[in-house]
């Protein structure tokens, strides 16, 4: 399913107990964050789930307003007892997330499958 907002398009898929949302900026080099949190929150409410994987592989940079939107979304999801995980960040976005100390709260997974599985203890070989 695809949903559009002025500055964003969202590819939305349902996973086993998760909503997977890939935000795609209409202008990747100048990604805006206006109403990102509200748009994704509405999708979560429509799907009756508060377990979200944000697949960020189409976002080139995490500007401060976009980080603030993610923080707001994280807060709303936390209040519902849900989980927000992020995957697909490029190296520049990973550094931006690390600088804000959000990386430890949201995780930073390479793929949606890793994000859904979440942190796993190391298994002995």
Image: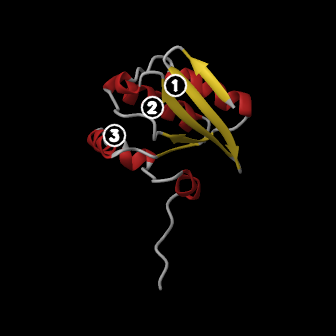
Question: Which residue is disc 3 drawn over?
Answer: 93
State the image coordinates of residue 121 (x, y, percent, origin top left): 48, 70
Left or right placement of residue 106 versus residue 40 in this view: left
**Element type at mark 3:** helix
**Label 2 Cα crowd, 10 Å radius (few <14 / some 14-19 / many 20+):** many
Which residue is painted at 43% across and 32% down in the image?
71
Between tags 3 and 2, which lies in front? 3
State the image coordinates of residue 61 (x, y, percent, origin top left): 34, 33
Compared with residue 91, is residue 121 higher up or lower down, i.e. above or below? below
Which residue is painted at 58% across and 53% down in the image?
116
Compared with residue 27, is residue 109 higher up or lower down, i.e. above or below? below
State the image coordinates of residue 98 (x, y, percent, origin top left): 30, 45
Quadrant position of residue 92: top left
Residue contact at pointers 1 and 3, CB within 8 angstroms: no
Left or right placement of residue 37 versus residue 3 in this view: left
Question: Which residue is disc 1 drawn over?
Answer: 37
Q: Earlier in the sequence, mark 1 or mark 3?
A: 1
Residue contact at pointers 2 and 1, CB within 8 angstroms: yes
**Label 1 Cα crowd, 10 Å radius (few <14 / some 14-19 / many 20+):** some
Taking depth in this image into account, of 75 and 102 the one nearest to the observer is: 102
Q: Quadrant of the N terminus?
A: top right
State the image coordinates of residue 97 (x, y, percent, origin top left): 33, 41
Which residue is painted at 49% across and 60% down in the image?
119
Instruction: Indicate which disc residue 114 carries.
Output: none
Q: Earlier in the sequence, mark 2 or mark 1?
A: 1
Residue placed farthest to the top in the image? Answer: 6
* Alpha-carbon span between mark 1 and mark 3: 18 Å
* Alpha-carbon span between mark 3 and mark 2: 13 Å
Compared with residue 125, is residue 45 higher up or lower down, i.e. above or below? above
Question: Which residue is disc 2 drawn over?
Answer: 70
**Element type at mark 1:** helix
């Amino acid at each position: 399913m695809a949903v559009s907002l002025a500055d964003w398009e969202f590819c939305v898929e349902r996973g086993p107990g998760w909503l997977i949302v890939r935000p795609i900026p209409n202008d990747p080099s100048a990604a805006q964050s206006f109403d990102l949190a509200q748009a994704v929150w509405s999708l979560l409410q429509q799907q009756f789930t508060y377990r979200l994987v944000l697949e960020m592989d189409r976002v080139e940079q995490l500007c401060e307003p976009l980080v603030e939107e993610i923080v707001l979304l994280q807060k709303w999801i936390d209040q519902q007892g849900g989980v927000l995980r992020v995957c697909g960040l490029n190296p520049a976005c990973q550094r931006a997330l690390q600088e804000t100390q959000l990386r430890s709260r949201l995780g930073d997974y390479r793929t949606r499958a890793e994000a859904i599985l979440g942190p796993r203890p190391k298994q002995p070989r």
